[in-house]
């Protein structure tokens, strides 16, 4: 597939709310594949469509357990709370401490249009929350308790 340009903090598209996807066609499937390639090339664990300039509710995530493609994801339940470091491909050379749920239950469509449920914990739950925030125009820095430049703090979670 193709690599897409990752939009950086300051780009107004990152602050807009994404529209639901009503039809899963070849364009959406190509978008998802391109997002996976772009995420992998940038060594990320997740990427939302607005980060590549598309205001649609689509997310790709890979925390090391295989790629998950989520269309119109919706958090149905969450529990617990944990503060950990996060980074973002749209905010290079920075990370921050963010409180997120320890567990989430998510409803979404897969690329075949089938409704799926996913119960996630740990890094996957964090990545899902982070990427869904992107769909609503929210950056992790909006929720960060504290932020660091990459030179200050090096304990960022990265996909190996």
Image (tube, grey):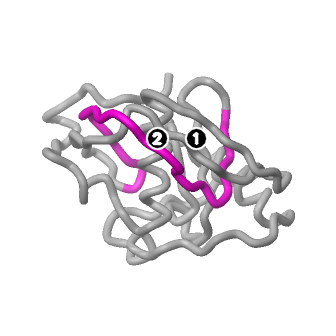
Distance from label 2 to label 1 (Cα)?
7 Å
Per the image, label 1 sits on a secondary structure element best described as strand
List x then y, in percent, for residue 118: 63, 38
Q: Earlier in the sequence, mark 2 or mark 1?
A: 1
The image quadrant that residue 149 belongs to is top left
Q: Nearer the viewer, residue 65 or 31?
A: 65
The residue at which mark 1 appears reads as 61
Task: Read off the magenta span.
Answer: 67-90
Residue 51 appears left or right of 94: right
> Where is 100 relative to 19, above or below?
above
Per the image, label 2 sits on a secondary structure element best described as helix
Asked if marks 2 and 1 touch (Cβ < 8 Å), the reply is yes
116 drawn magenta: no
List x then y, in percent, for residue 91: 33, 54
Residue 49 appears left or right of 82: right
The image quadrant that residue 55 belongs to is bottom right
List x then y, in percent, for residue 63: 53, 30
């Amino acid at each position: 597939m193709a690599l897409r340009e990752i939009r950086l903090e300051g780009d107004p598209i990152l602050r807009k709310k994404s529209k639901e996807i009503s039809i899963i066609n070849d364009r959406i499937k190509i978008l998802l594949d391109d997002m996976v390639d772009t995420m992998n090339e940038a060594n990320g664990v997740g990427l939302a469509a607005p980060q590549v300039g598309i205001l649609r509710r689509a997310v790709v995530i890979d925390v090391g357990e295989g790629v998950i493609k989520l269309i119109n994801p919706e958090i149905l339940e969450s529990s617990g709370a944990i503060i950990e470091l996060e980074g973002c491909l749209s905010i290079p050379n920075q990370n921050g401490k963010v409180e997120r749920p320890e567990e989430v239950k998510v409803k979404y469509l897969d690329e075949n249009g089938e409704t799926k449920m996913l119960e996630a914990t740990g890094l996957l739950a964090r990545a899902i929350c982070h990427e869904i925030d992107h769909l609503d125009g929210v950056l992790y820095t909006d929720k960060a308790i504290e932020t660091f430049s990459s030179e200050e703090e090096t304990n960022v979670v990265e996909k190996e």
